[in-house]
Image (tube, grey):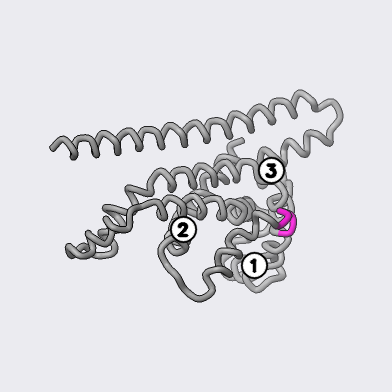
Amino acid sequence: MLLTLRVAACCVGLLLVPGVFLGWLLARKRFFGRTWLEAAIHLPLVLPPVVVGYGLLMLTGRQSHIGSFFENTLGIPIAFTWIAAVLASSVMALPLMVRAVRLAIEAVDKGQEQAASVCGASPIRVWLTITLPAALPGLITGMILAFARSVGEFGATITFAGNIEGQTRTLPLAIFRAMQLPDAESSVHRLVIASIILSLTAVFISELLSRRYRDSALRTEHARSRS
């Protein structure tokens, strides 16, 4: 369970910057190859997770250039380690985070952004003071979705990271292993309940934070209208 939480937390941290950037890029920019980029981002949603895991294994395994560089030069093996579990979860969760951020940014009023730019605000200041606060509920939703997707990830993880006890065996893999053992029904039940509790907690926290943010935004808007 601790390994599952660590992998999920690292997955969210790894996706935070690229997820927000890609969501903003798809929401605000028009460029050549945009459709292909969007298709590539959402490809893990339609591919079998085993295919994604196999692709990651071919890309960063010990026989690949990337994998051999990390292992031989930096001393950091990737395949069949907890790092591989993080990468597998991140690839599978990226489409969910990008989509949530993109929809949130598309809902932000462009007029406010343009007005701030006309008044002399830099693009970074516009992003930090207008776009990001308005899109924050979507960002929180994307982070929670990525966390929950990482908690439930199985196919890509078992292919790329393996099912090594104490190293890569997350909750879904532990459930799969326990189901193969005789007289392990009680263990399966405990692991299933733990997975459900983790997922429900993630959804509850997401709804709680989003509700608090919406209430705060409404109070601020009401105070401005009164003044």
| Mark 2 / mark 1, whichever is N-terminal | 2
| Mark 3 / mark 1, whichever is N-terminal | 1
Residue at 18% x, 39% y: name it. 224
Q: Between 106 and 144, which is closer to the camera in this rendering? A: 106
Q: How far apart in space, not on screen, are marks 3 and 2 (Cα)?
A: 31 Å
| Mark 3 / mark 2, whichever is N-terminal | 2
The amino acid sitting under disc 1 is Gly
Residue 101: image tag: none
Total marks drawn? Answer: 3
Residue span colored magenta: 47-51
The stretch drawn in magenta includes residue 106: no
User: In the figure, 73 relative to 192: above or below?
Assistant: below
The amino acid sitting under disc 3 is Arg
Q: How far apart in space, not on screen, are marks 2 and 1 (Cα)?
A: 29 Å
Outermost residue to the left:
227
Label 3 residue SS: loop
* Residue ID for mark 1: 67
Residue 125, located in which quarter of the rendered image? bottom left
Q: Between 154 and 162, which is closer to the camera in this rendering? A: 154
Residue 23: image tag: 2
Residue 169: image tag: 3
Q: In front: mark 3 or mark 2?
A: 2
